[in-house]
Image (tube, coloured by chain):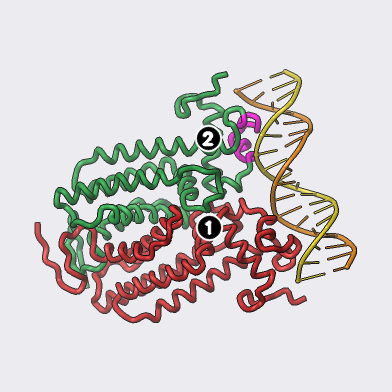
Chain colours: A green, B red, C orange, D yellow
Amino acid sequence: METRQPLSTADMGARERLLESTVNLFAEKGYAATPVREIVENAGVTKPVLYYYFKNKEGLFHAVLDWAAELQEEVLGEALNTPGTALDRVLAMTQQIYLGVIEYRNLFRMIHSLVFGPPQAAPDYDFGRYHRRMMDVISGLYREGIEKGEVRGANPKEAALLILGIIDFSLNLDHVYEQKLDPERPQRLIRLAFEGLGNRHVPSMETAIPRQS
Amino acid sequence: METRQPLSTADMGARERLLESTVNLFAEKGYAATPVREIVENAGVTKPVLYYYFKNKEGLFHAVLDWAAELQEEVLGEALNTPGTALDRVLAMTQQIYLGVIEYRNLFRMIHSLVFGPPQAAPDYDFGRYHRRMMDVISGLYREGIEKGEVRGANPKEAALLILGIIDFSLNLDHVYEQKLDPERPQRLIRLAFEGLGNRHVPSMETAIPRQS
DNA sequence: GTCTATACAATGATAGAC
DNA sequence: GTCTATCATTGTATAGAC
């Protein structure tokens, strides 16, 4: 029967258009609020085509999410190959993430609203995997920074929470207010978190920041 | 006709049970994935009762959200009456928020997934109001801290983003992993943000800090 | 592989009795 | 105010022709 495809490569056909349509609609309306009819219309095919390539609406859902996990690995993989201090590497990773989000914006928005949305609004899936993977990578970066003496010895897990929280929240903001993505914001906030909100007159580790008042 | 009620007080009747049922189900499954049949079953009434008190499913939705805005004002009002330094007050506010979230947990979860979920998964509503209100309050607290010389002069809006991001992310974590709420976490992370991730050996915010390297 | 046509269940909403 | 019974619509999914 050969209904199995590589899911990524070169048959710019009905299957890929269905995946793309699904991502766009789930990002905008969520799983439950998106009728199959719209998915297929948007992909320029008819309903039976969907049920030919995927078992059902839920199968389509899983196909998209597994694809997302692959992309996350690509992004983090590049980030891990970056040299520099802990702050450098965290900023570079953040940059990579933003580039990935810009390229696959709706995919990210879909994942994000699934992770933080109502638990039963969509079929079961281990959404925590994205989060855990991020935590592992970031806490690893920070831990190395401690060993090299670049940063103070805060609990790496807590530090990772703070950093991931910033990235996450920044992306959320861009999403909620539907502004253009502000690729600078998470970097600014992360620097702020490294420098500290409370300490007056702190020279930055990387940049010399002008101060006044 | 007199179908207008105060929405809050003492008729522990069908209307209130409907609101509570709605909150619980929307928090768990979201707007689109929650059938009115379940709402009324869970409230122990029948469908026409719902349509008697509220215009339709969407009217019920709005009623719940307006109620949430009132509660937000209560919580922030208490927080604003707290004395102390900027850090003290931010921590106190965070504490108040957590108390509120514990008391009205599902209401918060519902709001949150609506704010950060897919835009068209539910009827239109100005969800940004909750966020803007938080930003105003927090940036105000920080600004006062600057004027009193308690904190360094970071951009109050950016500082508010960082702080709100922490609160938000903490609540998200508790939600996503369905752990018990950890009321300590946001406080820890906020202190961490005030102290700074990057600065080794940081004395508290009041004193001037020496640097090295 | 892709279509037309349709089966079948679930949903939001209401009419009308009490 | 609350119920029983019902309607119109929309949803997912499939049969069967090509």
Q: Is residue B132 left or right of residue B159?
A: right
Q: Is residue B179 above or below residue B18?
A: above
Give x and y (percent) for residue A210.
Answer: 20, 63
Amino acid carrying mark 1 in the image: Leu
Q: Nearer the viewer, residue A19 or A99?
A: A19
Q: Is residue D1 left or right of residue B164?
A: right
Tell me the residue at 57%/70% (across/down).
B67
Mark 2, secondary structure of its residue: helix
Of circles 2 and 1, the one toward us is: 1
Residue position for label 1? B114
The residues bearing labels 2 and 1 have C-alpha atoms spaced at a distance of 24 Å
Tell me the residue at 49%/48% (across/down).
A114
**Residue A194 lies in quadrant:** bottom left
Q: Is residue C11 above or below residue B106?
A: above
> Disc number at residue A19?
2
- Magenta segment, principal secondary structure? helix
Q: Is residue A199 left or right of residue A71?
A: left
Give x and y (percent) for residue B72.
Answer: 49, 71
**Residue A207 lies in quadrant:** bottom left
